[in-house]
Amino acid sequence: MATILTPEQEAAYHADGFVTLKGLFDAQEVALLNRAMAEDPAIAEHMLVRADQQGFGTKIALWNRAGDSVYGLAARIPRMVDTAERLIGEPVYHYQSKLTAKEPHEGGAWEWHQDYGYWYHNGCLRPDMLSCMIALDATTPENGCLKVVRGSHKMGRIDHVPLTDKQNEADPARMREILKRHEVVDAVMEPGDVFVFHCNTLHRSDRNASDKRRWTLLICYNAVSNDAYVKEDDRSYVPLEMVDDGAILRAGLKFSDGAQEHFAGQAFVPDVRRAG
């Protein structure tokens, strides 16, 4: 299995629950992904707004399949797939992708949560899942970068409670204790960097109070053997057809055909009151 990970990066991921891969996408690739996110009619048609408690909103678009669009190809190149397989330890499939667009002075906050706090309810039995956040802009504390709790992936799945109709949050009482004992790290990135984090890593982000936007593309992978058993959720196993690392530049500004990606009409927010 080919990988761009160094032994030190792999060790950091398993110890901390995250690792930053600098410059994984070059400037031309980032420019194509940026333009696709801004200009693809399918992205615009499926853009949702997820409001925080203060009424500030983050624009998101979600899709469940990796097709032949330039952003679908980004999920299928070896430098991404091999990295996910090395860290998870077995073959993976594309689970979900998401654009998160925090506009200047408007992009909302996300409260502390684990991705597996959501994905558990999609029928994934084990936390053998991770996310790769591609920076399309510089991400800083000022524009609402991701914040993570170092080592929190080792705590297992934490109970989540409803926050709004658009967000659940990790148990606030437990979070207070966690934050007393564990370091919070800002995921500061330049365009083209990729922040890889475990599905049980606690994370949040502040509102974008700056005059600079913060757009990121998240590509999520699940172990094939951990296939989601909730089939109607549209995130169960589909074979991942890999392409070579030059596929993005060869494709150029290739948009969705409107069908391959399986765009979501709404964000999935499990009813954790009923689930408990």
Image (spheres, rainbow, N blue to C red):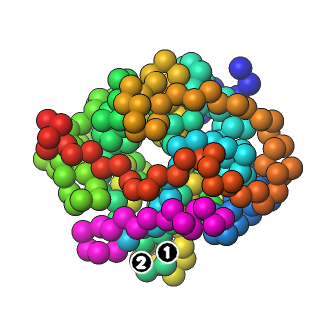
- Left/right of residue 224 with respect to residue 122 in the rendered view: right
Viewer can see residue 46: yes
Q: Is residue 195 magenta?
A: no
Residue count near mark 1 (Cα–Cα under 10 Å), binned few <14, some 14–19, many ≥20: many
Kindly check if marks 2 and 1 are in contact, taking CB atoms under 8 A apart as contact: yes
- Left/right of residue 208 with respect to residue 84 in the rendered view: left
What is the x, y in percent for residue 146?
Answer: 44, 56
**Residue at numbered disc 2:** 106
**Farthest residue toward the right?**
250
**Residue at numbered disc 1:** 103
Examine the image and state in which quarter residue 16 appears. Answer: top left
Residue type at mark 1 is Glu
The structure residue drawn at horizontal position 81% and vertical position 44%, both measured from the top left corner, is: 247
Residue type at mark 2 is Glu
The structure residue drawn at horizontal position 54% and vertical position 73%, both measured from the top left corner, is: 213
- Label of residue 233 in the image: none
CA gap between label 2 and label 1 equals 5 Å
The structure residue drawn at horizontal position 53% and vertical position 22%, both measured from the top left corner, is: 224
Above or below — where is 3 with respect to 255? above
Which part of the image, by quadrant, shows the N terminus?
top right
Above or below — where is 196 with respect to 269? above
Which part of the image, by quadrant, shows the C terminus?
top left
- Tell me the SS state at disc 1: loop
- Tell me the SS state at disc 2: loop
The stretch of residues the image draws in magenta is 40-56
Viewer can see residue 207: no
What is the x, y in percent for residue 158?
Answer: 24, 36
**Residue nearest the observer in this picture, 152 or 213:** 213
